[in-house]
Image: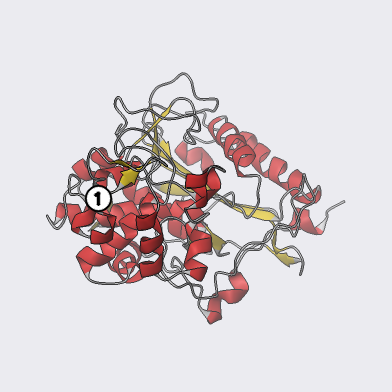
């Protein structure tokens, strides 16, 4: 029997003009993907919608520069039983970080900042840092490169329970609802660093600080800088830090409770203004928009004749920046991946517990959004969910997309 959830499952082979995306489209077989094998992805997601594991999802797959599949599953708003739509808007959390890094790198290309610059050149409050509860003087200042690769010594308050972690905001998603940017920077300035700058990778509020550096250098709010340098040039019409009132009905909502623990699961309303644009995790986007950003990177900085970054800058962004630097006990990028600038980069064929290619790169969002680019396979995948089960679906997507590549 066909259920409503099944009816809502769509596999759009985008060789028709009905879909509004302006990346070129192709049928699956035209770009070396098997329709029969890729159907396993939709079937798996559909089963989890029916089981109440996820509310719904949008998964976009592009290969060789053309969108071949967009799978739309389940419900955009499970409480209201509103069906998922291709243009649903998702909270993308840390998928904000690569975009802010690209904006900063575009300023680097103009000679307006250098990766070796001390952060205090732009944010004086972060000069003369101390490290640890002992308040040992930092051996050197944190740099722009440290911010981009999470070796600044900063942390997230939710990364641990020691006294130092308690001095930091839990996340920028929380902080930006309560603090102004000046108050946020003041909070960081009062806390000691967890590690010496450049000594260890520590996932952190670094990209939020980088966002502030971008604002200072450009002389504009972060949203304006991202709009001018990324969103408008790439045609990303639904990506921002705030969902306007006329788009509010497109916001994707999670299930009200965690599917495993039964605890309440609630996400902040992205239509409510924040006190600052948090570059580490507060943007919203659509599968279509983020695919354009990812395709620009795959194209070595250009899309539709518009150049956002130079090819050598994309190369710099997507190569190893942790040479000789400790990755620490909780390295979120996982086995087989190093860290570039603003994203994780696959080091080789072995070690990683999921399929991919040497040089593929990615970074997920805390609410289960996920994307990756595989230059060897000329592949872009963007998956949009709102769920606490992100790690599971990232690995599932990798397996079910790669097994569908047949040539």
Q: Position of residue 100 (x, y in %)?
A: 34, 56
Q: Is residue 306 visible?
A: yes
On screen, residue 282 above or below 348? below
Q: Secondary structure at mark 1?
A: loop
Question: In this view of the protein, which residue sits in the foreground, 402 or 335?
Answer: 335
The residue pinned by badge 1 equals 128
Q: Quadrant of residue 39?
A: top right
Coloration of the structure image? secondary structure
The residue drawn where x is 49% and y is 29% is 329
Q: Identify which residue is drawn at 30% across, 24% down.
A: 324
Whole-percent x, y for residue 76 in the image: 67, 63
Residue lying farthest to the right in this orientation: 1
Q: Is residue 150 left or right of residue 353?
A: left
The relative height of residue 179 versus residue 349 in the rendered view (above or below) is below
Camera-nearest residue between 253 and 220: 220
Residue found 77% across the figure and 56% down from its top: 5
| Image location (x, y in percent) of residue 190 | 38, 56
């Amino acid at each position: 029997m066909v259920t409503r959830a099944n009816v809502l499952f769509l596999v759009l082979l985008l060789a028709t003009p009905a879909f509004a995306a302006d990346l070129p489209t192709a049928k699956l077989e035209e770009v070396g993907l098997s329709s029969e094998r890729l159907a396993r992805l939709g079937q798996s997601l559909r089963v989890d919608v029916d089981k109440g594991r996820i509310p719904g999802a949008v998964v976009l797959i592009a290969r060789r520069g053309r969108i071949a599949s967009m799978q739309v599953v389940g419900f955009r708003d499970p409480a209201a039983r509103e069906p998922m739509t291709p243009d649903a808007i998702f909270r993308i959390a840390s998928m904000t970080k690569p975009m802010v890094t690209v904006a900063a790198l575009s300023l680097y290309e103009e000679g307006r900042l250098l990766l070796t610059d001390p952060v205090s050149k732009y944010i004086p409050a972060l000069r003369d840092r101390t490290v640890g509860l002992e308040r040992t003087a930092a051996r050197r200042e944190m740099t722009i490169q440290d911010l981009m690769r999470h070796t600044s010594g900063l942390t997230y308050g939710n990364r641990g329970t020691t006294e130092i972690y308690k001095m930091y905001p839990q996340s920028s998603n929380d902080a930006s609802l309560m603090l102004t940017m000046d108050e946020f920077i003041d909070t960081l300035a009062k806390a000691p660093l967890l590690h010496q700058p450049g000594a260890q990778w520590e996932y952190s509020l670094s990209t939020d600080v980088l966002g502030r550096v971008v604002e200072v250098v450009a002389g504009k709010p972060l949203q304006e800088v991202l709009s001018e340098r990324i969103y408008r040039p790439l045609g990303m019409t639904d990506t921002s830090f705030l969902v306007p009132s006329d788009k509010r009905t497109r916001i994707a909502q999670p299930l009200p409770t965690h599917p495993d623990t039964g605890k309440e699961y609630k996400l902040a309303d992205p239509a409510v203004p924040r006190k600052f644009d948090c570059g580490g995790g507060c943007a919203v986007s659509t599968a279509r928009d983020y695919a354009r950003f990812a395709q620009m990177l795959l194209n070595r900085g250009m899309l539709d004749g518009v150049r956002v970054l130079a090819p050598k800058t994309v190369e710099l962004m997507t190569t190893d920046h942790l040479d000789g630097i400790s990755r620490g006990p909780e390295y979120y990028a996982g086995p087989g991946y190093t860290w570039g600038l603003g994203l994780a980069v696959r080091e080789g064929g072995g070690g990683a517990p999921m399929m991919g290619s040497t040089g593929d790169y990615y970074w997920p969002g805390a609410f289960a959004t996920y994307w990756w680019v595989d230059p060897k396979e000329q592949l872009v995948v963007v998956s949009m969910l709102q769920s606490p089960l992100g790690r599971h679906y990232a690995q599932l997507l990798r397996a079910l997309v790669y097994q569908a590549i047949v040539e």
